[in-house]
Image (cartoon, rainbow, N blue to C red):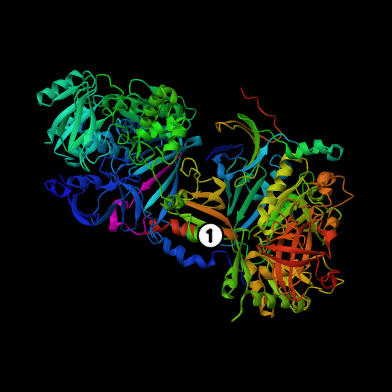
Amino acid sequence: MAERRSPLAGFAARFEAAGAGGRLRLAELPFLTQINVRVDPEGRAAGRIGRALGVPLPVEPGGAVRSGDLTVLWLGPDEWLVVGPDEGEDEGDARGPGLRDRLAETAAGTADDHVSVVDVSAQRTTLVVAGARSRDLLAHGCALDLHPRVFGPGRCAQTLLARAQVVLVAREADEFWVLCRASFAGYTAEWLLDAATEYVT
Amino acid sequence: MLLIPCPWCGPRDEIEFHYGGQAHVAYPDDPAALSDEEWARYLFFRDNPKGPFAERWSHSAGCRRWFNVVRDTATNEIHAVYRIGEPRPVIA
Amino acid sequence: MTATERPVQADRPGEVLRFRFDGRDYEGRSGDTLAAALLASGVRRVATSVKLGRPRGIFSAGVEEPNALVQVETPFPEPMLPATTVELYDGLVATGLPGKGRLADRPDPARYDSVHAHCDVLVVGAGPAGLMAAAEAARGGARVILADERPEPGGSLLGTAETVDGLPGRRWAAERAAELGGFDDVRVLCRTTVFGHYDDNYVVAVERRTNHLGAAAPATMARERIWRIRARRVVLATGAHERFPAFAGNDLPGVMLAGAARAYVNQYGVRPGRRAVVFTTNDSAYPAALDLAGAGIEIAAIVDVRRAPGEEWARRCAERDIEVRTGHVVRAAVGDGEVAAVSIASEAGGQAREVPADLLLVSGGWTPVVHLFSQAGGALRFDEEIGAFVPGEIRQAVEAAGSARGVPTLSGCLRDGAEAGRRALAAAGFAVPDPAPPPAVEHEPEAAPARHLWLVPPADGADHREHFVDLQRDVTVADVLRATGAGLRSVEHVKRYTTAGTAHDQGRTSGLLTSAITAHALGVDVADLGVTTFRAPYAPVSFAALAGRDRGSLHDPVRVTAMHDRHVDSGALFENVGQWKRPWYYPREGEDMAAAVLRECRAAREDVAMMDASTLGKIDVIGPDAAEFLDRLYTNMMSTLAVGSIRYGVMCRPDGMVFDDGTVIRLADDRFLVTTTTGNAAAVLDWMEEWLQTEWPSLRVHCTSVTEQWATVALVGPRSREVLAGLAPGLAVGNPSFPFMTWRDTEVAGIPARVCRISFSGELAYEINVRSWYGLALWEAVEAAGVTPYGTETMHVLRAEKGYPIIGQDTDGTVTPQDLGMAWVVSKKKPDFIGKRSFGRADTARPDRKQLVGLLPEDTGRLLPEGVHLVEPGGTRPLGHVTSSYRSAALGRTFALALISGGRERIGARLHAAMGAETVPVTVAHHVLYDPEGARRDG
């Protein structure tokens, strides 16, 4: 099997260096499984998908819910991104069918509802932006109000970071995920590293 | 930089949106039945009022939903935001 | 008296800072502005004026300065700074300017950035009103930002030395600001100028973070930072600027605003002169005169145009033996290059008296700083009492407080600010705590009404050519009169005719005066005439600050494919396609572009070649109605496409003009994968969503972008089948089992892949798609099979030889599929699709429409420039233009594509390409110049 290469494979050392001052942590979480699900949230299929995920699809705009090692992100009123761990190099391996297949199977059972399940695992990569200055760092390029009362854990947003579209997820008090398109990942990483300059030492 | 209240995501900066021109200009049911003039009117003619104007926006950098806005073209005041398919609210 | 003779005030406290000005070394003190240090060093002439070259001194003590413009030379040249705002640091080097600066000839090494911020209440200005407003809002629990342009809070308190709550004003302000800093959700920004106030309380400010540190500025710290603030409520406590009347010689060094002189004495311990005359229209100059007298400056006289000042001021002057000449005016400041005497006369007329003085303080009243209020959309109204425009109605959640809305006293400003803070708190939805007792201030003498004097007429027979209105632009009363004499009636027109108010001080001291003089000349009321529009920026902002981090390699996102690093290693040159970096060509040792492209083309036509095609947009279109949906979007039929097959398609706008093209792959009955052009990927997805959401919500279809899920290698050329067979042993590659326009899932080089047999080159070709994290591995595996990489230039040549158009290059939004010679792609069977009705319009059937044709220059080595126009031999009427032009290895000559009026009818005809004086003869040809039967592609 050929080797996979993540969009930010070349940035590991620079991310590490940006954490030197202890106020920031930058890292890529490569190869996370990401499944785009589009379904009518009121239909029966949505309920079945929620049961399969172990958590109902969040209907509140900007909601991010977790179920075990899965995170379900609200992207739109009929659109979600299910994020799970790297499932390895094969689509289905010894652990059984992959997340996409499980969701597709669940969805297929509801003939009257129209569901789309699309594997977008390689479409975006995931950057962790964490640490005491993580909000300050993101605020250089993100126009959203990131105040903990407004955008705390359990929130996500599709928005712009600098000039790139991203999905921003508040994971923990001082930890964010920035999901960015693979082609924009290098730009986003360079931008974050540049913006982090003041917070490194 | 307008602050546009997306009906789903809430207020976001104008830069996240894509402008879609005048609202409530429906694609004709049967274009073939229209005269050239009627078709040209659908294609090319739009209102350009000074004052409240119903227009379409898409939250293209967010939830990608299209929706309607009544915006005062003279002051940029947004009087109403409503979803596609809903009737234009009456602005006093 | 010249500068060298003036005493240097070396006895001031503070740390000594050395600096150099106009080539001479001086000393100042910590806390000085450059202006304060120059005054303390006896330097009076700082700059010369822009038009007339007159000597100019220091006129003010703040951002309103029109005269003392300097250029800071180190660490990096920055032009056009008012010396009154430049903080002194050790090693400062500056030069006085003749009204114009010099741009640096090298890149600025400093860092700049920007930050977004949100608050419930933004308070602009940390003077008495602003501090109180911020304190009240903070006390109520609001998120507050307090921004002030100066290095420390206090505003007017810094210069007046008034006390608040028994503390010197400066200390009181520092303590209030420190308290504010203790709140979690309060941010106090000093050295931060709010310069723009836009819709929905979007307020933009610039923070100067390291300028005052000189060489000690940390290199990692952004020198300036743009704050982009969204505030629910804004309190504008922006204060007021003192103004001056027009009189002869009012631009001479030594003429200074009275409040500024007071600030130099109180805040900096600097005596701006030795013997002063004070010329005023209001009471505010009296405490200034008394403070100067207390600092040892002789007050030769106070010249007050009114019948009487406030009684208490008159008494205090009498106690100090200061002469007050009421009902008098200053006719002229007299001196050779700076003030040496002041000519005083009764306003009623009569003989003028010259009083020796080196300082002339002027006060024509106070003009509220309404710039931001006006930018925010607020209306202004004229306040007769203060003789200036003040904030009126405003739609946005904004209010002005303190002297920014004409409140004249310190106690009034403190109270007004507190009330504004409490109103903002309530409006932002917070519970308003009980009011705190107002801070105590010193006894405030009852004020006598001000008189609004704009112009002191010249002595008999003299003109107005030394009565300055706008000091920075050298505009005089004579210029304004010339404008009104020319018939101009609008103050906006007068501004443009005279340039008054167009300098970078934004007419802070001159705007109202210009209006008043214009009104006077026209015989109208200034209240009716109004003032010119206030526009952002309130104060100059460098482009570097506005650009922030968006420069150099971060200027715009650079999008790269998964194979990018390998392209770089291969020595590819890159072409920008939208934000993408695409390999343009891969020159080998000694090759120029033409040689490399000819070699790459030959490889594709004669052997086997490969291209990174990952940038094409890709959209999954899924749902029971997906086929119907695509039938409506594309001009051709998609519902009849078999699973496993691929069809080329064109999308038009409703007007029938080509919008995009690409391939449609049917993955399942209810599942398609659509490709778009590289540049239109987002636009096509938006287009699909628009129709689904706004017109056809009943269609059960979902669209999902998968552009970057897949990396794509195009494998092209007569040997491509053989190479593919080697890489994909499990795939039946023979023509019958894997025909043109079909796709197969398989493994290529051990990687799960979808192989599409499609061709954008006219050759036997495949596109191999893998998940993008395998893109690099796939590329390397294919290249290792001995395949020649090629770039976008070769792709263009190959497709142009086949007459395949590039949307956006060979089309421009006015081109139909029929114009492109692709009538075959327009369905006759479908009842409707987007654009169909427009093909029945007379316009789209005109025989003289521009149509895509080939062009063959008669000189087979001549390459036509793209964009060049074509005419009939001997004619001049442009018939169209060249859209694509290349050298062809396959044709052994140059060729071009062009959009030509009635082009298809002209095939075989001779036209001239009009290239300046030269005309280049060409023959019109069919747009498909290579393998028109498609035998190579389909075999």
Quadrant in the rendering for residue C217: bottom left
Q: How many marks?
A: 1
The residue furthest right is C829
Q: Is residue C432 above or below residue C575?
A: above
Q: Position of residue B33 (x, y in %)?
A: 87, 37
User: A44 and C784: which one is in front?
Assistant: C784
| Residue C31 visible in the current orientation | yes
Quadrant in the rendering for residue C52: top left
| Residue C750 visible in the current orientation | no
Tell me the SS state at disc 1: helix
Q: Which residue is mark 1?
A: A187
Q: Position of residue C543 (x, y in %)?
A: 44, 51
User: C153 and A98: which one is in front?
Assistant: C153
Residue count near mark 1 (Cα–Cα under 10 Å), binned few <14, some 14–19, many ≥20: many
Q: Position of residue C456 (x, y in %)?
A: 28, 27
Task: Indicate left or right for A105 with C150 as reference.
Answer: right
Q: Is residue C323 above or below residue C865?
A: above
Q: Is residue B45 above or below residue C442?
A: below
Q: Which residues are magenta?
A: C202-221
